[in-house]
Image (cartoon, rainbow, N blue to C red):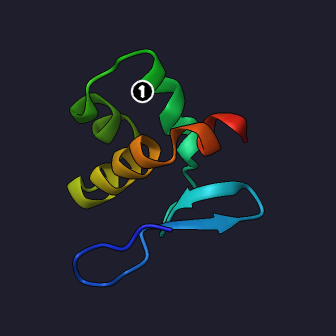
Amino acid sequence: MSLASDEQITIIRTERGLTIAGTRITLYDVMDYVTAQYSPKFIQGLFDLTEEQINAALAYIETHRTEVETE
């Protein structure tokens, strides 16, 4: 799981898989757009995420890409 600077958990595991905390958006949803090389700003606007949420999601994907792709 990823911790933000204020110690909130931003990526959590739910029954749907790895999810951005406070949303129903999974990292797998975001990963499709990352793989298609959309810009972070586009993805952020598409899913109506805060800058902190998109940064946490992208950082988690970058750090744990194999795990995210496997799931």
Left or right, 50 with respect to 9, comes to: left
Q: Which residue lies furthest to the top in this view?
A: 36
- In depth, the one of 46 and 56 nearer the eye is 56
**As shown in the figure, which amino acid type bears the numbered disc 1?**
Val
| Residue 54 x/y as whole percent | 32, 49
Q: In which quarter of the image is residue 53?
A: bottom left
Q: Where 68 sits versus 7, above or below?
A: above
Residue picked out by circle 1: 34
Q: Where 66 sits versus 57, above or below?
A: above
Left or right, 6 with respect to 37, comes to: left
Left or right, 14 with respect to 27, comes to: right
Q: Where 3 sits versus 25, above or below?
A: below
**Residue at the image point whose x is 51% and y is 33% from the top:** 31
Q: Quadrant of residue 58?
A: top left
Find numbered disc 1 in the image and state the secondary structure of the residue it sits on.
helix
Q: Residues within 10 Å of mark 1 (few under 14, many from 20)?
A: some
| Residue 60 x/y as whole percent | 43, 52
Q: In which quarter of the image is residue 52?
A: bottom left
The C terminus - image quarter: top right
Q: Which residue lies furthest to the right in this view?
A: 15
Left or right, 12 with respect to 6, comes to: right
| Residue 47 x/y as whole percent | 41, 42
**Residue at the image point whose x is 22% and y is 34% from the top:** 41
